[in-house]
Amino acid sequence: MRSLMLGAGLVLGACIGGGALAQERPEPPRIDVVASGMVELPPEIATIRYVVRGEGQSADEATRALVARKEQIERALGQFADTRLDIRTGTMRVQEVRGAECRRGEMGMAQPRLSTGACAVQGYAADMSVTATVSPIDRAGTLTGAVAQAGGSDVAMAQFALRDPAAARRKAMAVALANGKAQAEAIAAASGAKLGPLLRVTDFDMRDGIVAQDIGSLPRVVVSGSRLASVPVAINPDKVTITARLNLSYEIVR
C-alpha cells in the first residue's frame, strides 16, 4: 500500500494489492480520516452521596439506630414534592468499637485482639452508603443540606450527568461523522480526486464497527462555523461534555 501523510490522523491511500488474487480484486483507492465530535448539554440529574450511621451497645441496637436514621433522612427528602428522587443503598457494615487504648498493629494494620482489658468491646457502629439521584438539578444543593440536617454523614453533591448519555453520544458521533466528511472532501479536492461513498466507520474509542449502511440511524447534524426548614442553595453546574472519535474510510473516485 502506498500512502501519503496529509496531517495528524489523515491518510490518503492508494491501495495496490500484491499477488494474483489482489490483482484480480484490487482494493479501491480510499481516504482514511480520524474525526472527532463533541456535544455539550446541560446536566439533567445530580447525584448526592451520603452515609447513614447508627450506634448501640449491641449489633442489633446499632442496626436499628441506622434504620431509624435512614427513614428520618428519607422522610425529610420526601417533603420536597416537586423533586424526583431515586434513592439507592450501597454497602453496609457493622463494626465493633473498642477504646482508644486498644492499639492497632504495626503500620496501622489490624491484628487479632481479645475483647478484654483495654480492647474490650464498648459498643457497635453500623453504617450504610446511600446514593440519591435528584432532578431537577436546581434543587440538588438544597437537598444536600437537607440530608445533612436530617442526620446524614459525609454528605456530598458528587456529580452531574445526563439521563440518557447514549443518546448524547449518538449526537457526538453524528457531529464527528459530519466533521470527518468535510475533512475527507477537502483532502480529495486537494488531491484532484472526488470523494466517493463511505465504505466503513469504526468507533475509535469503543472499537465498534459500523457499516456505512447503518449511518442513517444516527441523528442528522448540520455543522456550522418547602416545609422543611432547609437552607436554599443555588447551583450553576458546568455542562456535560460528550465526545466521540471515529475512523472513516471513503472511496476515491478518479
Image (cartoon, helix red, strand yellow):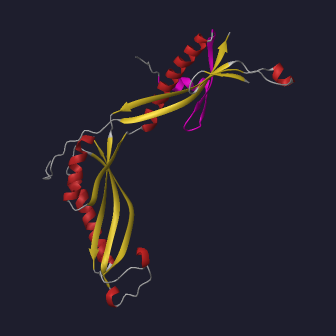
What residue do we see at 66% from left, 15% from top? 252
Residue 69 to residue 35: above or below = below
| Horizontal side, residue 158 vs residue 149: left or right | right
- Within the magenta stretch, is there residue 194? yes
Kindly identify the residue that appears in the image at 23 percent across and 56 percent down: 147
Q: Is residue 207 left or right of residue 93?
A: right
Of 61 and 238, nearer the camera is 238
- The answer to whether residue 179 is visible is yes
Residue 80 at x, y percent in the picture: 21, 48
User: Front-most of 134 and 101?
Assistant: 101
Q: Residue 151's x, y, as percent?
A: 22, 62
- Give the quadrant of residue 216: top right
Residue 226: in magenta span: no
Residue drawn at the location 33% of the way across and 42% of the way down: 45
> Which of the two residues, 108 or 134, is positioned nearer the viewer here?
108
Query: In the rendered image of this protein, does residue 76 appear above or below residue 117?
Result: above
Q: Residue furthest bottom?
A: 117
Left or right side of 86 for 10: right
In magenta, the rendered stretch is 192-219
Image coordinates of residue 143 in percent, x first then y, are 23, 50
Classify the position of the N terminus by image quarter. top right
